[in-house]
Image: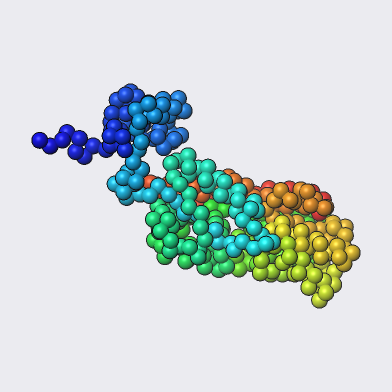
Amino acid sequence: MPSNNIGVRKSESGLTMEDLARLAGVSKITVSRALRDSPLVTLETREKVRRIANEQGYRLNVSARNLRMRRSYSVAVVVEMTPVKGRPMSDPYPLELLGGITQELTTAGYSVVLTSKQLMDTAPVQGADGLILLGQGSHGEAVRFLQKAGLPLVVWGAPEAGADYIVVGSDNRKGGVSAAKRFLEQGRKQLIFLGDVDHAEVQERCAGFIEAMGGQAMVHIVRPKAFTFEAGFDSVAALLKKKGAGFDGLFAASDLLAMGAIRALAEKRLRVPEDVSVIGYDDTPGAASFVPPLTSVHQYLRDGGVLLARKMLGLIHGDNVTSEMLPTTLMVRQT
């Protein structure tokens, strides 16, 4: 005689989810959500379901569930940047983004696989339900590389004309505008933009900066090939050696670049901000404690991480998802 339980989902203990729902006095979907710690279920109900599950020896067979639903319940986060001594993974970017992503995805019952472009062929990445890319790369090459995987994709960066992927980022153009307005208020006329404009985010910062100047000041672009303290120092030291102190303001695409620039200026006995005013970007924790405290454009990176995860969950669930930019704030200090 065939069993009545054929086709009914069982846990590793033999108890079905329907059994657990009946014992808890809730629906089967509520049990499923409660066991995944979903915020759609109240904390009281989650605790009640988990308590009864523990008492009954219920253990959800996650592998079987995922196979049945053709989902891995995992998202791969790909970091575009190559960690170097002067710019480690422990920096606020990308660590704050990762914090927000992990918080949101784990709350929704998803695991996070942290990886790099070089490890895209590994099983955990290939089996993920979607990809979150932190950084578009020079000329967007990192995006094009990941699009080959054919998985839902959300990118931290800046919108590009004709782009067919979802982008979350800061309003880099307005960040550049805020820096320009600060220099105009100070009467600075000979300016340097320090950053690699091959990167979409940096290009937007530079474009907003130059447009807001409206021809009221001269802007010379210097393009270091890294975002490190050393790159900022070397670029400005070379500029001073070649042209001398022919500028009175410098806007850097990152705080580390700005700090390196300040060190190079100091070695030539140029005072900041008296001789050269300097503005950074990111408003990292080190900006406020730097000497002198660095004026910088603040990015809300943790909020950005949460938003990246929400966009990804929307794509996985088939929702209508659009790109979104977060605000920036100029933090005025002593440079």
Taking the image as shown, residue 22 lies to the left or right of residue 209, namely left
Taking the image as shown, residue 172 lies to the left or right of residue 146, namely right
Query: Which residue lies at the image location 55% right of the left edge and 61% below the top edge?
Result: 80
Taking the image as shown, residue 194 lies to the left or right of residue 335, namely left
> Which is nearer the eye, 225 or 124?
124
Coordinates of residue 117 in the picture (x, y in percent): 50, 63
Q: In the rendered view, would you say 285 is above or below 14?
A: below
Query: Which residue lies at the image location 34% right of the left edge and 27% below the top edge?
Result: 56
In the picture, residue 149 is in which quadrant?
bottom left
Camera sees residue 142: yes
Residue lying farthest to the left in this orientation: 1
Give the quarter of the figure containing the N terminus: top left
Colour pattern of the rendering: rainbow
Coordinates of residue 327 in the picture (x, y in percent): 62, 48
Coordinates of residue 259 in the picture (x, y in percent): 76, 59
Q: In the rendered view, would you say 106 is above or below 56?
A: below
Query: Which residue lies at the image location 44% right of the left edge and 27% below the top edge?
Result: 47
Coordinates of residue 158 in the picture (x, y in percent): 56, 58
Give the quarter of the figure containing the C terminus: bottom right
Residue lying farthest to the right in this orientation: 269
Camera sees residue 327: no
Query: Which residue lies at the image location 47% right of the left edge and 39% below the top edge?
Result: 107
Q: How many marks?
A: 0
Q: In the rendered view, would you say 211 is above or below 47?
A: below
> Which is nearer the eye, 247 or 120?
120
